[in-house]
Image (tube, rainbow, N blue to C red):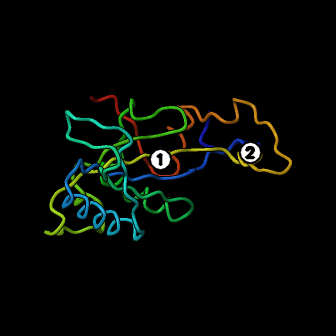
Amino acid sequence: MSNETPANKMHEVEVNKLVINIGTADDDQRQVSARRLLELITKRKPADGISKKRLPEFKIVKGKKIGAFVTMRGDESTATIGRLFEAVDKKVKEESISENTVNFGIREYIDINGVKYDPKVGMMGMNVNISFKRKGGRVATRKIKRGKIPERHKMVTREEIREFLGRAFGVSTTTET
């Protein structure tokens, strides 16, 4: 495929949502720091990740706070995605791309453009998950006049994601491990 947009507007790939996650295990102080950091990066109020299972080897009890995350959609997410890709030098590993999603980690938040070191937070890394979609997906989920969407329209392939990331954010893929 070329770098041109598809002839059919419904085949265009777009960002569905961005989720930034910081795992804190069972540490209350890290939980507070993670929430503060996510608010600093995204200017939005983060939610707490609650454990669904008991994992005694990690000292995790069911129902405890084990992380913090923020979900962003729309234009706000696009601007943040650009800053997050700059933190990883606009390179993503090939195995980080799967159908409909891209996942990558940021080791230290000070790599993100516009975020300064906060001694109250300390050093933390995070996981970034970006999901993709095509236009018209709401047809399958709306309540009234629900329609069917073919599988080929639901799936955004790895190649299409690579093209989109290169075109929209200038991101290249590497095969390094």
103 relative position to 111: left or right: right
Seen in the picture, residue 70 relative to 157 is either above or below; the reply is: below
Seen in the picture, residue 4 relative to 153 is either above or below; the reply is: below
Q: Which of 33 and 78 is in front in this view?
A: 33
Marker count (numbered): 2
Q: Nearer the viewer, residue 142 or 88?
A: 142
Q: What element carries label 1?
A: strand
Q: What element carries label 2?
A: helix
Identify the amino acid type marked 1. Ile
Which of the two discs, 2 and 1, sits closer to the camera?
Answer: 1
Q: Which of 7 and 47 is in front in this view?
A: 47
In this figure, which residue is indicated by the disc labeled 1?
130
Q: Which of 9 and 43 is in front in this view?
A: 43
In this figure, which residue is indicated by the disc labeled 2?
10
Residue 114 position, x and y percent, is 30, 69
Q: Residues within 10 Å of mark 2 (few under 14, many from 20)?
A: few
Residue 168 position, x and y percent, is 52, 51
50 relative position to 4: left or right: left
Rendered-image quadrant of the N terminus: top right
Identify the amino acid type marked 2. Met
Q: Identify which residue is drawn at 31% across, 50% down.
A: 64
Residue 93 position, x and y percent, is 35, 35
